[in-house]
């Protein structure tokens, strides 16, 4: 970072990561302003979404650090740019990742635009990732956070050169334990606050209950890999590939279950036939229907602004997955294909396939379909 003092607008979420981000930047001599983003308000008084409590925490942090904080409502942008897509994807039988779209459309677009109107030189968030400008190409690279257990580059892979050039990720250089230690040492009021999980508009509520408010139930048959009807689902939108819980068929047994199965093996969602409104399930974690060597993806977004060379890389098809060696091929427009050296488990349409070259996140796309036996 340049020693020159800059005006940096920090997204203060009420959590410890963004709080330490603001403190670090203030210590480095920057002029720091905090922004609290309110992204959901449909049922903000139900106790499931903690934005009111989070704002109180963010304001307390700003007071301790000695910076101003502004409360900005992006709920309309969120509903139009993120939630509408979320519902479309689920209605089509896919499983989207709204956090990825929220980063691209809200935190690094609506928020970035707002910060620029405030005269910001840069914005900063508490994400565990890093930005580096490549001296040879001049391009900005998105790197994994140094704490491998907290790396969030997967969620940031749709960021562009313009967005990265204006972004700082101070805690991406630290381990989570160091962030907690700093917060305790400087007396931040949220130093021991539990990390938030999931999406604000869902919060801790049962996911199916939430989705049922927006998507109508269309019950249909649950079939096993032999084509036998063994139950009834409540609607394909309410299930995701690889799902084990909540199928309502736990007591059923199947004779001669496939590899990795057995009579008492658990059931997993393996396929969703939207056209025939059928949910296909299999027994055993290692069933062939849950294994994929190749996938097709669309809506590609590349950090460098163009696709990487079609070469040996690595990819994640879901967050917290180890990097899986793969070959990138068939790059055409926003489409591409990946072929893995080892089968990937429950590759899910709607999720993101994100590519890496070592510690560098190259971008990725939305999984359209995966090839299974």
Image: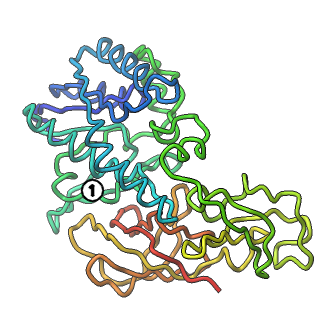
Q: Is residue 110 above or below residue 370?
A: above
Taking the spot 19% from the left edge, 59% from the top edge, the residue there is: 161
Position of 169 compared to 235: left or right? left
Residue 83: percent from left, percent from top: 37, 48
Position of 81 compared to 50: left or right? left
Q: Is residue 5 visible?
A: yes
Q: Is residue 330 above or below residue 47?
A: below
Residue 146: percent from left, percent from top: 43, 48
* Residue 231 sits in quarter: bottom right
The residue where tag 1 is placed is 159
Position of 284 compared to 137: left or right? right
Local SS, label 1: loop
Taking the spot 45% from the left edge, 55% from the top edge, the residue there is: 97
Residue 338: percent from left, percent from top: 45, 80
* Residue 33 sits in quarter: top left
Taking the spot 53% from the left edge, 47% from the top edge, the residue there is: 211
In this view, the residue in front, 85 or 297, is 85
């Amino acid at each position: 970072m340049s020693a020159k003092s800059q005006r940096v607008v920090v997204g203060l979420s009420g959590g410890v990561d963004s709080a330490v981000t603001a403190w670090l930047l203030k210590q480095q001599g920057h002029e720091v302003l905090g922004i609290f983003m309110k992204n959901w308000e449909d049922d903000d008084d139900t106790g499931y979404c903690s934005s009111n409590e989070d704002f109180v925490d963010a304001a307390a942090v700003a007071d301790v650090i000695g910076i101003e904080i502004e409360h900005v409502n992006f709920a309309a942008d969120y509903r139009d740019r993120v939630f509408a897509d979320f519902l479309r994807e689920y209605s089509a039988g896919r499983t989207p990742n709204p956090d990825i779209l929220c980063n691209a459309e809200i935190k690094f677009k609506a928020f970035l635009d707002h910060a620029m109107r405030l005269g910001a030189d840069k914005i900063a968030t508490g994400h565990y990732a890093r930005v580096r400008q490549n001296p040879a190409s001049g391009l900005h690279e998105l790197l994994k956070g140094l704490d491998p257990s907290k790396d969030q580059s997967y969620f940031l892979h749709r960021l562009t050169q313009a967005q990265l050039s204006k972004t700082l990720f101070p805690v991406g250089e630290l381990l989570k334990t160091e962030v907690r230690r700093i917060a305790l040492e400087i007396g931040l009021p949220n130093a021991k606050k539990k990390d938030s999980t999931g999406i604000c508009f869902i919060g801790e509520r049962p996911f199916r209950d939430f989705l049922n408010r927006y998507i109508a139930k269309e019950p249909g048959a649950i079939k096993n890999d032999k084509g036998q009807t063994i139950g009834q689902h409540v609607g394909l939108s309410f299930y995701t590939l690889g799902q084990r819980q909540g199928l309502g068929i736990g007591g059923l047994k199947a004779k001669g279950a496939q590899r990795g199965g057995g009579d008492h093996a658990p059931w997993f969602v393996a396929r969703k036939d939207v056209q025939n409104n059928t949910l296909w399930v299999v027994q055993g974690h290692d069933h062939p229907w849950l294994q994929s060597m190749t996938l097709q993806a669309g809506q590609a977004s590349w950090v460098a602004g163009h696709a990487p060379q079609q070469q040996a890389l690595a990819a994640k098809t879901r967050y917290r997955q180890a990097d899986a060696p793969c070959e990138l091929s068939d790059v055409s427009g926003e489409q591409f294909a990946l072929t893995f050296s080892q089968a990937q488990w429950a590759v899910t349409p709607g999720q993101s396939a994100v590519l890496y070259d070592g510690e560098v996140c190259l971008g990725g796309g939305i999984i359209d379909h995966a090839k299974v036996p």
